[in-house]
Image (spheres, rainbow, N blue to C red):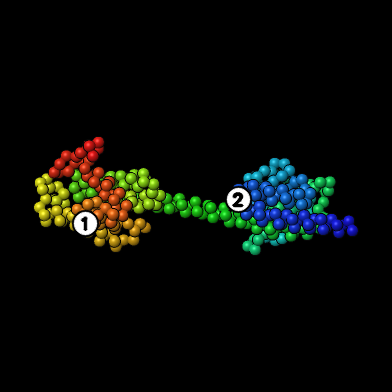
Amino acid sequence: MVDQNSKLFRLFAVLRTIAEVGPVATADHEFSDAARQILERILRAFESDQGALLLLDGAAAKVTCVAATGFAGLNPHSVLPLVGVPQHQWKQARAPRVTNRQQDIHELFGSSQAPFLNSIKCVAPLRVSTGPVGALVLGAREGQEVYSASDLEALEMLAPHVALVLHNHSLAESLRHQIADNLRLLSSLHHSYDDALEAFATTIDSKDTHLRGHSVHVARFSAGIATTLGMNEDEVAGIRAAAHLHDIGKVTVDKQFFAKASTLRPEEFRAIADHTVMGHQIVSSARFPWPHVPEVVRWHHERADGSGYPDRLHNDELPLSVRIVAVADTFDAMTSDRPYRQSNSVMSV
C-alpha cells in the first residue's frame, strides 16, 4: 500500500510538472530562465537536490548545460565534450536509467573527467522523432540513494515533454543564426550593390570634367535627406540607388553640349533634356528592388510649378523620392562650377 501511494504521489507530481512545463516554455522568458524554472519543477517532483538539463550537439560531439542545480563544477553554459562516444549510443538510449556506475555513465558521456559525472544517479536521455536532443540528469535525493521503478516510469512520461522544449530551443537558435547569417550576407550584397552603382555613376559623369562626382554627390545628399525625413534603411537604399542612376540617360547625349560655355540653342537643350526620357527607357528594362527608380530618372527635372520637363508635372503629382533627388540634384548643380558660370557658395544657396 505504501508503494502504491508512493507511485500515485510520484505520478501526480509528474503530471503537475508536465502541466507546468508548457506555460513556462511558451512564456515570454529568456530560454535560460525557462530552463531553470523547468528544472526546478522537475527536482521538486522527484525530491532531488541535484539535476541538470543538457543540450546535445551531435555534430560537435558535445553537450551544453542549459540549467543546473547542485552539481559541483556544472553551471549553465558549461560544455562537456563527448570523448570517445559514438553517435549510436545517444540514438539507442531511449529509456531513463538508474545508475551510479562509471561504466554505464560512460556509455553516454565518454571518458570525460568532469566531477559531476560521479554524482549522477539517474540519466533520462531526451529524444524527439528526429533523434536525440539532450539529457536530463538527476543526482542525490532527499534521504534516498536510488530512484525506484515508479520514478523511472514517471521520468519516461516526463522526458518527451522536456525533450520537446530543448528541441524547440535548438530550432529557434538555429533559425536565429541563419537569419543573422542571411542579414550579414544581405548587408554585404547591399554594400556590393552600392559600390557597383557608384562605379557606374562615376562612368556616367566622366563625359565631362564639370560633371565628375555629380551623381555620387547627389546620391549622398539624397540619402542624407531621406534619413533626416525618417525613412527606413531599405527606403534610404532605394533613394540612394535612384540618385546614383538619375543621369544615366546622359550617356546618349553628345558630350560637347555639356562643355558649352554659351547659351544652348533650342535643339541642343532638347537633346540634353531628352536624357530623362532616354534614362527612363534604360532603367525600365531592369528589375530593381525599388520600383521608384524609373520615376526618379524620368522626373528629377520636373518642378513644383509645372515648368520642368519632360512631362510638366506639378509638385502634388511627384512622388517624395523624386522630390528628394530633385532637391539634391539642384543643390549640387548650384554649388558646383559649370562652363557657363561659377559655383554658388553653400551659404548663399
**Total numbered labels placed on residues in the image:** 2
Q: Nearer the viewer, residue 336 or 174?
A: 336
Q: Residue flagged by tag 2: what amino acid is it?
A: Asp
Q: Residue 150 location, x and y as percent?
A: 81, 58
Q: Residue 47 location, x and y as percent?
A: 79, 49
Q: Nearer the viewer, residue 126 or 106?
A: 126
Left or right of 270 on screen, residue 136: right
Q: Is residue 37 above or below residue 132?
A: above
Quadrant (top left/top right/bottom left/bottom right) for the C terminus: top left
Left or right of 120 on screen, residue 348: left
Disc 2 designates what residue?
28
Which image quadrant is residue 89 in?
A: bottom right
Residue at 65% in and 61% down: 128
Q: In the image, which disc is placed on residue 61?
A: none
How far is mark 1 from mark 2, CA to CA? 56 Å
Q: Residue flagged by tag 1: what amino acid is it?
A: Arg
Quadrant (top left/top right/bottom left/bottom right) for the N terminus: bottom right
Residue 51 in sight:
yes
User: Please, what secondary structure does the residue beneath circle 2 have?
Assistant: loop
Q: In the image, which disc is placed on residue 312?
A: 1
- Binning the other alpha carbons within 10 Å of mark 1 as few (below 14), some (14 to 19) or many (20 upward) gives some
Residue at 65% in and 63% down: 129
Left or right of 282 on screen, residue 81: right
Residue at 71% in and 44% down: 69
- Binning the other alpha carbons within 10 Å of mark 2 as few (below 14), some (14 to 19) or many (20 upward) gives few
User: Please, what secondary structure does the residue beneath circle 1 have?
Assistant: loop
Q: Residue 142 location, x and y as percent?
A: 81, 46
Residue 252 in sight:
no
Residue at 65% in and 49% down: 34
